Image (cartoon, rainbow, N blue to C red):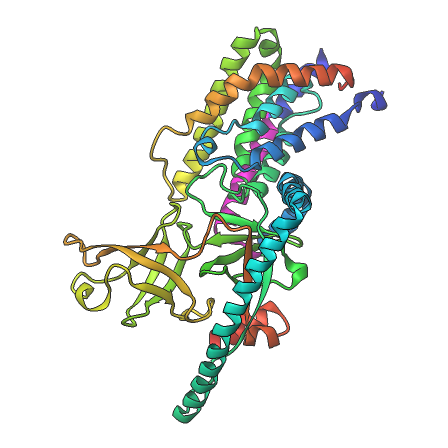
């Protein structure tokens, strides 16, 4: 039973590593504002697909790693990603039934929440947000969601991660 | 069904614990709790593989460029470097003579001799550290604790001051550039000796000089002036070029004028930077000790 319950964990780890890499990849100046929130996308997928394995603790740890990689305040993204994971795990049965485009809208809302929380924490630190640029990553993430979803779903089915 | 229902309660409990945990971590990090600093440097070493993988394509590209470049091209380059080297050697001859003269004059005056410095080349990893906060200016270099780097160690390039090491991992460390909004650097105008603080603005290639009074503007500073490190504060060696003054606006509403400068160093375009050790730092055994000697000077 326990062997069955831990099947294909390396795919999960690998997907997070790739998302970290995409998140710190250097981009040209104009594109940095539009960089999709790769880590949150992957986290949302796994929370919806296998909530019994990937949940808020995973989200928290992934967020801590992300904080170290981005040299931000430790705990900043840990907080926002564990909240995202919580919402995704809570609603996973409902979200699974949505068509892809509706899921994408859900992702837009989740990632906007995440970005707002980060902007808020930055505001407390004395670097307030001056424009609406926090919405850009959420928009690109929404557009990319169907592809991320299909790719990860196929990977999950092929390697039988459950 | 029972297990499903049982799962509901612990989830929100877990969540509140984790939220409290993150808030605690943020406070601890904000107020620079020393244990957390140590933990962070270990974590930085832990994520090194990811950073290495991101940097790998750039490294491979450079390697390919070198291997694929033609014989004629390499000879051309070699000739260019040879000529450049000759030129530099010639200037250095004069420099040595001047240095000797300077030391003699200082001896006559009875003031202490200026110390020499040691440098080490570090490579900048092609990794973005400001993907979440575009106003942050930080770079990652491929030297860490194992290369005997210290916290707050100054970093320069061929043209001037780049920044200082603010986080130390085992294999990599984070350098805060002088244009980062959290960075302040004691500087001096070469022409007149006027002192100020150069603060980063979080914008590419901009520094603002603080605490220059409106009335003092005519005397001490004008557009085109070179500013150098003043050496006060002790972290940075004296007399390294920092930038050039480009804009001076007297601000009648406040006691201080708004003065802007452009950094000399190629901050974000560098692929290699230099780490500087002053002589006291070289002789001191540990980082802590070197900082103590620096502060007493």
Q: Residue at x 19, y 66 (%)?
A: B216
Answer whether residue B38 is visible to the viewer in this image. no
Q: Is residue A101 magenta?
A: no
Quadrant where the N terminus of chain A is found in the figure: top right
Within the image, what quadrant is residue A53 found in?
Answer: top right
x%, y% of residue B106?
Answer: 42, 88
- Residue that extends furthest to the bottom in the rendered view of this protein: B108
Q: Residue at x 65, y 59 (%)?
A: B145
- Depicted B169 relative to depicted B284: above or below: above
Q: Is residue B20 magenta?
A: yes
- Depicted A23 relative to depicted B68: above or below: above
Quadrant where the C terminus of chain A is found in the figure: top right
The secondary structure making up most of the magenta span is: helix
Q: Residue at x 55, y 58 (%)?
A: B80
- Depicted A111 relative to depicted B115: above or below: above
x%, y% of residue A75?
Answer: 54, 40
- Depicted A26 relative to depicted B3: above or below: below
A122 sits to left or right of B195: right
* Front residue (pair A146, B14): A146
Q: Residue at x 37, y 35 (%)?
A: A129
Q: Which residues are magenta?
A: B12-34
* Front residue (pair B35, B79): B79
B157 sits to left or right of A68: left
């Amino acid at each position: 039973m326990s062997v069955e319950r831990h099947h294909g964990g390396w795919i999960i780890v690998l997907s997070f590593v790739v998302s970290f890499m995409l998140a710190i990849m250097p981009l040209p100046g104009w594109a940095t504002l539009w960089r999709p929130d790769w880590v949150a996308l992957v986290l949302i997928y796994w929370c919806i697909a296998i909530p019994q394995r990937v949940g808020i603790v995973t989200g928290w740890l992934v967020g801590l790693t992300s904080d170290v990689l981005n040299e931000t305040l430790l705990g900043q993204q840990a907080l926002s990603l564990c909240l995202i994971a919580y919402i995704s795990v809570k609603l996973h049965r409902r979200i699974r039934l949505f068509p892809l485009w509706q899921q994408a809208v859900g992702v837009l809302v989740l990632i906007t929440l995440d970005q707002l929380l980060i902007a808020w924490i930055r505001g407390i630190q004395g670097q307030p947000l001056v424009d609406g640029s926090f919405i850009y990553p959420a928009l690109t993430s929404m557009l990319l969601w169907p592809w991320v979803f299909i790719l990860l779903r196929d990977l999950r089915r092929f390697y039988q991660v459950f | 069904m029972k297990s499903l229902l049982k799962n509901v309660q612990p989830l929100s409990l877990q969540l509140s614990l984790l939220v409290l945990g993150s808030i605690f971590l943020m406070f601890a990090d904000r107020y620079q709790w020393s244990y957390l600093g140590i933990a962070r440097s270990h974590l930085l070493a832990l994520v090194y593989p990811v950073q290495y993988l991101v940097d790998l394509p750039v490294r491979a590209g450079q390697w390919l460029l070198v291997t694929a470049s033609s014989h004629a091209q390499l000879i051309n380059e070699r000739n260019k470097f040879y000529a450049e080297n000759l030129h530099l050697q010639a200037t250095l001859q004069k420099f040595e003579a001047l240095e000797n003269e300077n030391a003699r004059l200082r001896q006559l005056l009875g003031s202490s001799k200026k110390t020499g410095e040691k440098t080490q080349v570090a490579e900048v990893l092609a990794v973005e550290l400001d993907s979440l906060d575009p106003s942050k200016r930080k770079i990652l270099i491929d030297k860490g604790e194992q290369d005997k780097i210290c916290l707050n160690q100054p970093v320069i390039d061929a043209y001037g001051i780049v920044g200082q090491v603010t986080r130390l991992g085992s294999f990599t460390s984070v350098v805060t550039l002088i244009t980062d909004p959290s960075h302040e650097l004691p500087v001096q105008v070469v022409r007149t000796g006027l002192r100020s603080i150069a603060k980063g603005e979080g914008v590419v290639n901009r520094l603002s000089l603080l605490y220059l009074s409106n009335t003092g503007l005519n005397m001490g500073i004008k557009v085109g002036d070179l500013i150098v490190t003043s050496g006060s504060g002790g972290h940075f060696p004296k007399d390294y070029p920092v930038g050039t003054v480009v804009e001076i606006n007297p601000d009648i509403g406040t006691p201080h004028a708004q003065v802007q400068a452009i950094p000399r160093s190629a901050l974000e375009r560098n692929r290699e930077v230099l780490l500087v050790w002053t002589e006291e730092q070289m002789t001191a055994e540990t980082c802590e000790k070197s900082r103590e000697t620096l502060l007493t000077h």
